[in-house]
Amino acid sequence: MTTTPASTTPASTTAPPFDFTDRRVLVVGGTSGINLGIAEAFAAAGARLAVISRSPAKVTAAVERLSAHGRAATGAAADVRDAEAIARAIDNCAAALGEGIDVLVSGAAGNFPAPLLGMSSRGFGAVVGIDLIGSFNVLGAAHPHLAKPGGVVLHISAPQALHAMVLQGHVCAAKAGVDMLTRVAALEWGCDGIRVNSVVPGPIAETEGMARLAPTPEMERAVAATVPLGRLGTKADVADLCLFLASPWASFVTGAVIPVDGGIAAGGGGALASGMGQLRAVQKAAAVADAAAG
């Protein structure tokens, strides 16, 4: 019987190794998916949480969920593409957290599959607007509120920033820009004692992105086969890295773009690219089976 080595199994975050008691954490885009998982990890570690997203209903639900960890959370609805609206939302969240922000997690994102020649300028601009211009707007609006020294900014990037992917030209361009913003902000804000890093999640289970990429268990297995560690990542894997980067243990880490992808980036993304061929074969077989059944 084959077993997975202990070193590759997902870690438990039921007892957080980091103490963020009373630290003020704002998660932009933090009402669902990976970003909500990050917010929950900070809340479980004792932080005071605020979240921002476009949907008031999602903000309300996330605030209720985060408050269940024992500290009353807060939130605001705003579109990161609207510089004035996001600035107001960040001002309000910073005031509610206690007149400042210790940790900013910026993860608003948009995506849809489309080839370059099948994508409109409006569609390309929508993703760049959310991912890149939105990140720029958040940075500028948050800077006055960030602790100086000691503030931490974490951009949630994507593998498309590191590896070209078909049907993802808009995301590749936008997220590569986000990672360069990370590096420039790290250089310019170092004198304020603010650290800025990017976290690059690989294939993460139980996310909207994975549901689109691999909607069946067989397709999920095909994706997992591309990962050197042999499994999909978890939201906790990403959250654990974020907590580390926001902690004193990472006090000399800034300007870094760090994958949490089970080793995919170590191979230049080649494993993922080759695995996509296997995935497409599975998808084609499923389509043929559906057609035959119909």
Image (cartoon, rainbow, N blue to C red):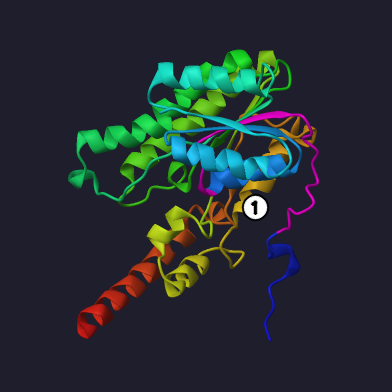
Check if residue 51 falls in the magenta segment.
no
Q: Is residue 109 visible?
A: yes
Start and end of the magenta stretch? 11-33
Q: State the residue at coordinates (50%, 23%).
A: 138
Tell me the quarter of the image containing the C terminus. Answer: bottom left
Q: Is residue 256 above or below residue 229?
A: above
Residue flagged by tag 1: what amino acid is it? Ala
From the viewer's side, name the closer residue of 43 and 291. Answer: 43
Q: State the residue at coordinates (66%, 30%).
A: 25
Left or right: residue 252 versus residue 238 is: right
- What residue would you read off at disc 1? 236
Numbered label tally: 1
Tell me the quarter of the image containing the N terminus. Answer: bottom right
Q: Quadrant of residue 160?
A: top left
Element class at badge 1 = helix
Q: Is residue 188 visible?
A: no
Check if residue 18 falls in the magenta segment.
yes
Image coordinates for residue 114, horizontal then vertical, percent: 26, 49
- Magenta segment, principal secondary structure? loop
Q: Is residue 215 above or below residue 20?
A: below
Image coordinates for residue 100, horizontal then vertical, percent: 66, 18
Image coordinates for residue 179, horizontal then vertical, percent: 50, 33
Image coordinates for residue 212, horizontal then vertical, percent: 38, 58
Q: State the residue at coordinates (48%, 17%).
A: 87
Left or right: residue 41 versus residue 58 is: right
Left or right: residue 292 versus residue 111 is: left
- Decide: few, some or many residues near mark 1? Use Cα within 10 Å; few <14, some 14-19, many ≥20: many
From the viewer's side, name the closer residue of 123 and 68. Answer: 68
